[in-house]
Image: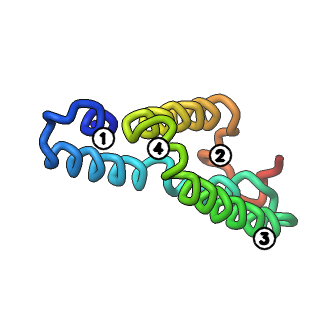
């Protein structure tokens, strides 16, 4: 929705707000907590603190890279192209989560190990 707002200029600004609100809502319910939950559940208790430190650093570093490159990429791809690119990246991340992460439901935290 957000990419279409920039792609088709005849859409109203309210569609952009709805698209942004939808993105934030679904991100908060889905992949947003992943950066905090996945390292806490996947790594064993012996390395969990160090793994969370690395995960937090990578989360902040990735956020910094995305934020600092936004205008450059938006200029190259247009705003709609940039949001479409982010959509494809999110699809790739969801596929990675689905196929590569182990199921931890019903297992104790002490039993987890990579």
The number of numbered discs placed on residues in the rendered structure image is: 4
Q: Residue at x 54, y 48 (%)?
A: 72
Whichever of labels 3 and 2 marks the residue nearer the N terminus, that label is: 3
Q: Residue at x 46, y 44 (%)?
A: 74
**Between marks 4 and 3, how big is the CA–CA gap?**
37 Å
Q: Residue at x 78, y 56 (%)?
A: 43
Residue 104, label in figure = 2
**Secondary structure beneath disc 2?**
loop
**Between marks 3 and 2, how big is the CA–CA gap?**
18 Å
**Between marks 2 and 1, how big is the CA–CA gap?**
34 Å
> Left or right of 44: which side holds 100?
left
Q: Where is residue 37 drawn, in percent x and y? A: 60, 57
Image vertical order of residue 99 relative to residue 51, above or below: above
Q: How is the image coloured?
A: rainbow
Residue contact at pointers 3 and 1, CB within 8 angstroms: no
Which residue was labeled with disc 1?
2
């Amino acid at each position: 929705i957000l990419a279409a707002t920039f792609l088709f200029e005849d859409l109203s600004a309210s569609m952009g707000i709805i698209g942004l609100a939808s993105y934030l809502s679904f991100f908060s319910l889905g992949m947003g907590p992943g950066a905090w939950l996945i390292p806490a559940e996947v790594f064993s208790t012996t390395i969990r603190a160090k793994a969370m430190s690395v995960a937090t650093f990578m989360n902040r570093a990735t956020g910094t890279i995305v934020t600092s490159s936004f205008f450059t990429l938006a200029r190259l791809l247009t705003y709609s192209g940039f949001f479409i690119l982010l959509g494809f990246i999110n699809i790739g991340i969801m596929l990675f989560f689905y196929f590569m992460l182990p199921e931890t439901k019903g297992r104790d935290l002490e039993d987890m190990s990579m």
